[in-house]
Image (cartoon, grey):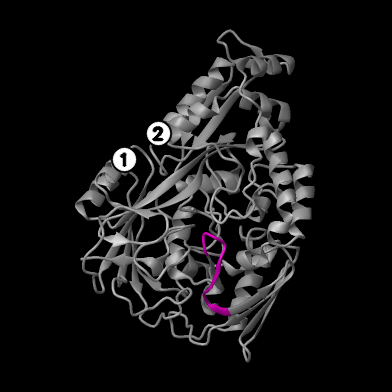
Amino acid sequence: MRSITPLVALVGAAALTLTACTAPGASGNDAGGELATDGTFTMAIGADPGNLNPMITAMSGARTIDRFLYSRLVEVGKDGTILSGLASAWKAGTTNATFTLRKDATCADGTAITASMLAENINFIADPKNGSPLVGLNVQAGTVATGDDATGVLSVTSGAPDAFLLENVGSVHMVCGPALANPDALAKGEGATGMYTITEIAPNSQYTLTRRKEFVWGPGDWDPKQAGIPATVIFKVLPNETTVTNLLVSGELNAAQVVGPDSERLRAKKLFSSDIQVGLGQLHFNKNPKKLLSDEALRIALTQGLDLGRLRSVLTSGTGTAPTNLVNMAPNPCNADVAAASIPAFDVKAAADALDSAGWKPGSDGIRQKNGARLSLTVMYPPYLSASFGPTAELLQSMWKEIGVEATPKGVDANGVSEALFSTGDWDVSLISLGVGLPSQIVPFFSGKTPPNGSNFGYTDNAEYVAAASSAAMKPGKEGCEDWSHAEAALIGAADVIPFANSVVSVFGSKAKFTVSDSLEPASIRLFK
């Protein structure tokens, strides 16, 4: 998702798990027949995940693998249903939560998973000196957790009201205690508390995981003795979707996300797929005061110069839909329609007039200038997600050229995206989406501290958004939906972010079935011979 979701895996709602072989949103008839015993499940990922440390990574590739390595307190279904994970019972409001732990869960090294160990995980994230991007996302700044090992109760006091405290804290990937203090070990996926452990890493090639036979605490009533659960999982780094498609058809791959035109070839072959809605297309502007796009009027003019429908069609091969809000994954408890009324309408003449009025006058080559500076912008896009991002960026380039804006498309790999957004700030416009299932999860990306001290990568400073989001956070669950909608409308209306394409993304399976929500759920995999 900050995810299978494009770009940054925002750790949306936890994946839904089922005990059966099929799942809601699944289709196709490729898998079937006799289940494999202790087989190997091979999945393609579009880019090397880099650092696997779940305490500090927000990248989709890394978090996809982390889902296999680290357990969560609870699992959250697509419909918002809460299932057991490491916790067998729980209770939560907006500021306090308690989790009663299972008694049979262990780390990969055999160490018992205790309440105090998990409290250390949460306190590590909350400690500002550790620089975790999960602050404000899963764990609020100032949060304090304590664990009573005698009773197995983990208590969490949130540093700020959180309307979805149970879902957010409950979805943290928990690591084994000793590894928490060893970032080099976590970077390699050690300290496992989940269903698999890392056994081999070949950077830019493949990551090999081995099943833990002692792992028996799967979500809900999951049965570890079921047939078809793979003994080995291999993630292959394969950036080319056509290559991935060929390997799926031949059976050399068991799973892969395919977004572009090749997906139709897989559907024609009637391969199994687990389908999810994601926000594939979002336009982000770098509003650093030193950048041109700190000017709201300029951002609005640029948005008016874009035919978002055409961009959506190219990005999704004509299959996408217009987003209604900024929460683009399940469970999306509010699901209000605020985008259409908030996005500045497409109007090339109005865009040109606004630029003229702001002093941006066409130069001899048609590119606008002001005070000796050209209206020249770099547009960053993620080619590793889909080949369709390149043509989308080029179409945007041509639209902006029509109103006198010079746009230079720049394809960037996953590690480059992370560096640009959360470290160097060297970007102007981004076509990289945030994937979230709860409205609270975008808050740290549109408010608060900026990189490298925070996750507010676009330098957003929107007082109306902050006020509405703060009000919503004090109301549990859906009670705050009106405020969340007001908050999102404020961001879109100021052109802080422009959502333009949702898409049903398919993770295809060959000789395998599984469930996907925020990422592929390891306990749901059933492998066939």
Q: Which of the numbered marks, if any, corresponds to residue 317?
A: 2
- Mark 1 touching mark 2, by CB under 8 A? yes
Q: Judging from the image, what secondary structure is the residue with disc 2 in?
A: loop
Residue neighbourhood size for the residue with mark 2, other residues' Cα within 10 Å, grouped as few (<14), some (14–19), many (≥20): some
Amino acid on which the number 2 mark rests in the picture: Ser
Q: Nearer the viewer, residue 414 or 437?
A: 437
- Residue 31: image quadrant is bottom left
Left-right relation of 211 to 328 = left
* Residue type of the residue flagged with mark 1: Glu
Q: Residue at x 50, y 37 (%)?
A: 321
Residue 151 placement: quadrant: bottom right
Please report whichever mark, 1 or 2, sits nearer to the chain's N-terminal start.
1
Disc 1/disc 2 C-alpha distance (Å): 10 Å
The magenta region covers 77-88
261 sits left or right of 175 in the view: left
Q: Which mark is residue 264?
A: 1
Asked if 69 appears above or below 1 in the picture, the reply is: below
Q: Is residue 224 magenta?
A: no
Q: Is residue 372 visible?
A: no
Residue 280 rendering spot, x and y as whole percentages: 49, 42
Estimate the x, y position of residue 465 in percent, counting from the top left: 75, 45
Instruction: Kindly identify the residue that appears in the image at 67 percent across and 17 percent down.
Output: 350
Above or below, 359 relative to 432: above
